């Protein structure tokens, strides 16, 4: 029986794979065969040598990995990169970010999303979970540039019921768009900006329409302490009493999760996950970090994230992987946690689960979507290789990603972006910056007061 030609064959690489128990392993001198946007097989380079294919990539000296997932970001905020520096979080929000965001137009969001997607593709990110405003524009950019995304229209209770209604409308209108590359979520901002009534209503809408929820909660310990002082409950307990822990919930940050929260998170009625963005916590001098070890012990996936570039200054998930490993070692006082293989597990399988795509991405195996990155390990900073997992986590950099593939489509090849025109985007965005960054009007879209 004849076999139809493959759409893409990547050959000669070392492939990061997971065994039946999800342990990290590497197959050398391997090949990946892609048909109809999915991985048809992971085989040997010899077996794929004569296979007919529409496109072939010789990946000798490179490692093939599942594309990285940025589990929580605000992609258009790249336009604010470096605008609010060396400030405590309340001043960062109230004096700079929320006044500037009151100026946002749909065009600003579109241009920011284009620049962000270019940055992420170049850094090996194939999927991102975004939580922002004017999200129709972001959906259009994702459709055009070829990435995968979970998108949610953010809202505050100060917007009135129309904010929540708009979040639902966006989620229903766009889920399954871009040939299935776009999934959607309801996106209340946080328990300190959204009332219990709105959170309860959001939980009901999520259950009624089969939608996940993506929000900030227990971002830092100060928020948890303030919630306890004012209301007698933690932010996680607010999520419980409003029914959100019975939905498929993605919690951004969670550095303020405390021991009394863990039993609630362990027995949620839905799929609960946490996204950790460690660089931002360092910048804001928060005393703690996401309790990865405790969450993993109760079965809560922890995915890797960058947050927006206004608080991180980059959308580099590779750096988030490295920092997560190092900060966990320091926080736990244990050099054996997180290991390089554990960090790769969070960057692949757990990140895919965090955004609700654990059945389709996160590993390179037959039937999975062909979201693949090729990492060049021939540079002097990655040689010699004694432990390939350690080389990937602690020596390789996002700039070592040479090729990025989503759904079998090559979005970057040999560092050349194929679906976005960065110079054009930068010119237009910089022309608009004076109006975007003006704070003389005295407005802000919200108040940071936990």
Image (cartoon, grey):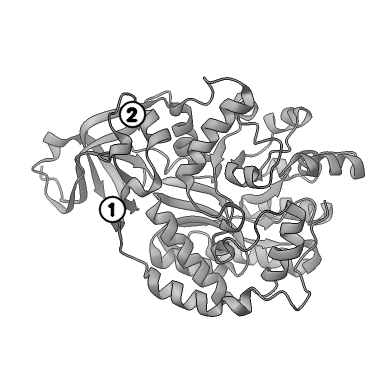
Residue 306 in percent (x, y) is at 55, 49
Closer to the chain start, of discs 1 and 2, is: 1
Give the residue displayed 85% in from the left and 44% down from the top. 226
Q: Identify residue for label 2.
A: 388
257 to the left or right of 107: right
Q: Nearer the viewer, residue 135 or 86?
A: 86
* Residue behind mark 1: 36
Rendering quarter of residue 390: top left
Q: Position of residue 101 (x, y in %)?
A: 67, 69
Q: Is residue 377 left or right of residue 44?
A: right
Q: Secondary structure at mark 2?
A: helix
**In the image, residue 17 lies at what x, y percent?**
34, 32
- Say which quarter of the image contains residue 297: top right
- Give the label, 1 or 2, closer to the camera: 2
Give residue 91's quadrant in the image: bottom right
Task: Choose between 151 and 79: the one closer to the eye.
Answer: 79
Q: Residue at x 65, y 62 (%)?
A: 168
User: In the image, what residue occupies the spot 38% across and 35% down?
Assistant: 395
Tag 1's secondary structure?
A: loop
Query: In the figure, 98 relative to 189: above or below?
Result: below
Crowding at mark 1 (Cα within 10 Å: few <14, some 14-19, many 20+): some
Res 403 visible:
yes
**Residue 403, numbered label:** none
Image quadrant where one finds the N terminus: top left
């Amino acid at each position: 029986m004849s076999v139809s030609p493959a759409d893409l064959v990547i050959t000669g690489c070392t492939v990061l794979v997971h065994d039946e128990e999800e342990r990290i392993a590497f197959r050398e001198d391997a090949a990946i065969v892609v048909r109809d946007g999915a991985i048809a097989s992971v085989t040997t380079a010899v077996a794929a040598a004569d296979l007919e294919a529409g496109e072939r990539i010789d990946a000798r000296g490179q490692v093939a990995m599942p594309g990285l997932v940025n589990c929580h970001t605000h992609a258009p905020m790249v336009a604010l990169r470096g605008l609010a520096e060396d400030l405590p979080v309340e001043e960062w929000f109230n004096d700079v970010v929320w006044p500037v965001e009151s100026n946002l137009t749909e065009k600003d969001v579109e241009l920011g999303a284009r620049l962000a997607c270019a940055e992420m593709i170049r850094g090996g990110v194939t999927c991102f979970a975004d939580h922002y405003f004017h999200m129709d524009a972001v959906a259009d950019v994702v459709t055009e540039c070829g990435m995968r995304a979970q998108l949610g229209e953010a809202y505050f209770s100060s917007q009135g019921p129309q904010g929540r209604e708009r979040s639902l409308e966006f989620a229903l209108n766009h889920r399954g768009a871009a040939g299935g590359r776009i999934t959607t979520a309801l996106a209340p901002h946080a328990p300190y900006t959204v009332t219990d009534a709105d959170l309860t209503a959001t939980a009901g809408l999520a259950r009624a329409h089969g939608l996940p929820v993506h929000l900030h909660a227990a971002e830092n310990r100060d928020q948890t302490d303030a919630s306890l002082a004012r209301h007698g409950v933690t932010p996680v307990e607010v999520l419980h009493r409003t029914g959100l822990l019975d939905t498929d919930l993605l919690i951004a940050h969670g550095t303020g999760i405390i021991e009394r929260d863990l039993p609630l998170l362990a027995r949620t009625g839905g799929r609960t996950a946490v996204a950790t963005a460690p660089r931002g916590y360092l910048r804001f001098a928060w005393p703690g970090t996401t309790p990865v070890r405790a969450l993993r012990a109760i079965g809560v996936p922890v995915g890797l994230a960058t947050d927006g570039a206004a608080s991180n200054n980059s959308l580099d998930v590779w750096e988030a992987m490295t920092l997560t490993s190092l900060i966990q070692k320091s926080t736990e006082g244990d050099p054996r946690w997180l290991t390089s293989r554990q960090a790769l597990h969070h960057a692949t399988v757990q990140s895919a689960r965090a955004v609700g795509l654990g059945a389709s991405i996160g590993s390179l195996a037959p039937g999975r979507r062909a979201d693949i990155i090729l990492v060049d390990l021939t540079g002097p900073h990655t040689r010699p290789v004694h432990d390939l997992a350690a080389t990937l986590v602690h020596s390789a950099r996002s700039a070592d990603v040479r090729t990025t593939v989503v759904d079998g489509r090559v979005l970057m090849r040999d560092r050349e972006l194929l679906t976005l025109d960065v110079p054009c985007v930068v010119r237009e965005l910089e022309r608009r910056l004076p109006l975007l960054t003006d704070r003389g009007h005295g407005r802000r879209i919200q108040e940071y007061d936990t």
